[in-house]
Amino acid sequence: MQRKSRHALTLKAYDGEGFAGKTLRERGGTSYAFDKSGVTITQDGVERVFALTWLFGAGHYARTPVFKDGERWVEQRLSWYAATGKLSLTPGHPVQPSEDIERAMGVVQTPQNAARCFGCHMTGERAGVHCENCHGAQGGHPVAKTIRRDTSVAACATCHRSPSREYASPIPEVEDPMSVRFAPVGLVVSRCYLKSGGKLTCVSCHNPHTSVAASVSYDKTCVGCHAGKSAGTCPRTPDCASCHMPKSTPVPYLTFTDHRIRK
């Protein structure tokens, strides 16, 4: 079950899926042509071929190639988006046309940032998020109760991001609309979380061993705390989340659930 989840599929070796055969020409004249091994970037008659190494993302929202240029890890300028099946600018990359091939290839990552990215998308030397990332190495774990289980928001936020200097405000989504991408950031400033004394966590609603499904109703969790007058008079039950956790599209082609849990 976990092996087929988005966690397990969040990184894989580049194989051209979603990219091979696709081309794109930016308004500045830079052109990209992808195949099963990499991308050819052409600008002002100059052509360079880059072998792509990894695809980040399980493909539910998007996939982004990452590769090495010499000793530098580079996040490719273009990503594949599930919403359209097409290529477009990778979030966080400059929208201005690339001035040269160096900029056209993408954003160079610092060694520290690259290590952090791979640290969340790999399990040791194995691509994807697997048991050991959350439970620790157990050497076969013959007794299930000995497996470490940290179900706090902080445990999930190790990779899914937690409030920090950038998101210290009680209204993080106003300071940075992209913060909605990181569920713990909104959740821990929500009234529900604060009044629960930390008892409301990610796993209160989500099974970390499976992918989040749009068909799943979370009303049972909500009513568990809001039973009585507030739940009984709500005109929208079932389906609490559609009102209190609306969808947000901070950038084109990427839509996330706002975990702020609004009134």
Image (spheres, helix red, strand yellow):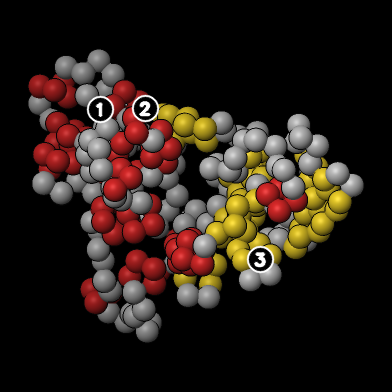
Sort mark 1 into few (<14), some (14-19) or many (20+) by Cα contacts within 10 Å. some
Q: For residue 127, say whether it is visible.
A: yes
Kindly identify the amino acid type of the residue bearing the numbered disc 2: Pro
Question: Is residue 13 in view from this perspective?
Answer: no
Q: Is residue 128 above or below residue 238?
A: below
Q: Which mark is residue 68?
A: 3
Residue 193 located left or right of residue 65: left
Distance from label 1 to label 3 (Cα)? Answer: 42 Å
The CA distance from mark 3 to mark 2 is: 38 Å
Q: Residue at x 35, y 51 (%)?
A: 161
Q: Mark 1 or 3 closer to N-term?
A: 3
Residue 19: image x %, image y %? Answer: 73, 48
For label 2, the SS is loop
Q: Nearer the viewer, residue 198 or 209?
A: 198
Q: Quadrant of the C terminus?
A: top left
- Splitting the image into 4 quarters, where does residue 228 fall? top left
